[in-house]
Image (tube, rainbow, N blue to C red):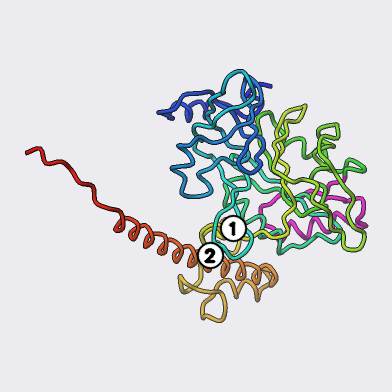
Amino acid sequence: MSLVEYGWNKYWSKQLSKISGVSGIPARVISEHRDRYTVHSDQKDFSARVSGRIKHQASRSDDFPAAGDWVVIDPRGTGNEAIIQAILPRKTKFSRKTVGKRTKEQIIAANLDAVWILSSFDFDLNPARLERYITLVVESGAKPVLLLTKADLSTDPATIVSDLAVRLVNVPVYAVSVVDSLGIEALKSFLEPGTTIALLGSSGVGKSTLINHLAGSDIMHTAPVREKDGKGRHTTTRRELVLLPNGGLLLDTPGMRELQLWGPEEALEKGFADIDRIAEKCRFSNCSHGSEPGCAVQIALDHGELSPERIENYKKLREELILLERNLEVRTGITDKQRRKTYIREPSHKFKDIS
């Protein structure tokens, strides 16, 4: 398969021309597993690892390749091994905060055109969590699309779709069923040649099943969900880019039970554009949209223009992002302090007096 089918175009050719100091051929990262990557080039697929230079210069996790990245590789010999020499500047980057208390970024995927957020009509449907997903996707630069799977299990899917479309402003919502092919044709309109779309959602919502259906074959492993709570097992263990027969690339991702925000407070301005637009009319620029006088958001809420649930979730996510920024400031301050100590401890270089 050519690089064009994997998304290579004039834009990436221009980015490649700006890379200096390395030699090699362009390739795309189609999967990652710890410190090894599978990359696709015009020649063939390679098992690759990053160069010592990349390791030495890396200071953050996003200095390493991620699924969807375009890279420059140096094939070694006639085998399937290669060294990643450089990463082309990313067009989009989808990240989350790492699981746990550590304030670090984890890149889920790079250079995405859209993200299909999957949630099923059964136990999994949670509007507040969907707003969290949408906020992350919009911040990444990709376009969010909501797919409600297993529509064949719902008695009134149209009403649920309509209600969610009202709450989730400017986000397309589709009812999908692989069983009776409901909504499948609408999804195919997104799958233009070279377009990269990631699938995001909890385990058991049908990400791998949908990919298999669109691919026309069982290329991804699937497993049934538990009838007790509708939760599924992690059948996808790593992020993998799949080229569909009729064009378009889908990136399957492992189910995520925890998806913490990553980005500045301003990320909410994109994910909650309706609230942000109303908030511009607040009397105070730092309005918390609580009991302050002249709060346009509260007025809109009283008039039924905004739902109480959406406002509460907006405030919750806003507090989470503010806390994230504070933690990052503290962490950066500690890192800078440690660097200064290291610099001071280093012995000064003694130069030979040649005068």
Q: Is residue 87 above or below residue 204?
A: above
2 and 1 marks in contact (CB < 8 Å): yes
Secondary structure category for the residue under label 1: strand
**Left of 153 or right of it: where is 54?**
left
Q: Is residue 30 above or below residue 202?
A: above
Q: Quadrant of the C terminus?
A: top left
> Amino acid under label 2?
Leu
**Left of 23 or right of it: where is 145?**
right
> Amino acid under label 1?
Lys
Q: Residue under circle 2?
A: 324
Badge 1 crowding class, 10 Å Cα cut-off, few under 14, some 14 to 19, many 20 or more, is some
Residue in the image at 65% along x and 72% along y: 312
Residue 285: give x, y in percent of width and height.
Answer: 45, 70
Dot label at residue 278: none
Q: Does label 2 or label 1 sit earlier along the sequence?
A: 1
Q: Is residue 143 above or below residue 277?
A: above
Q: Residue under circle 1?
A: 97
Q: From mark 2 to mark 1, how far is it between C-alphas?
A: 9 Å
Q: Is residue 212 magenta?
A: no
Q: Is residue 167 magenta?
A: yes
The part of the chain drawn in magenta is 149-177
Q: Quadrant of the N terminus?
A: top right
Residue in the image at 73% along x and 59% along y: 257
Quarter holding residue 20? top left
Residue in the image at 53% along x and 25% along y: 74
Residue 241: give x, y in percent of width and height.
Answer: 69, 36
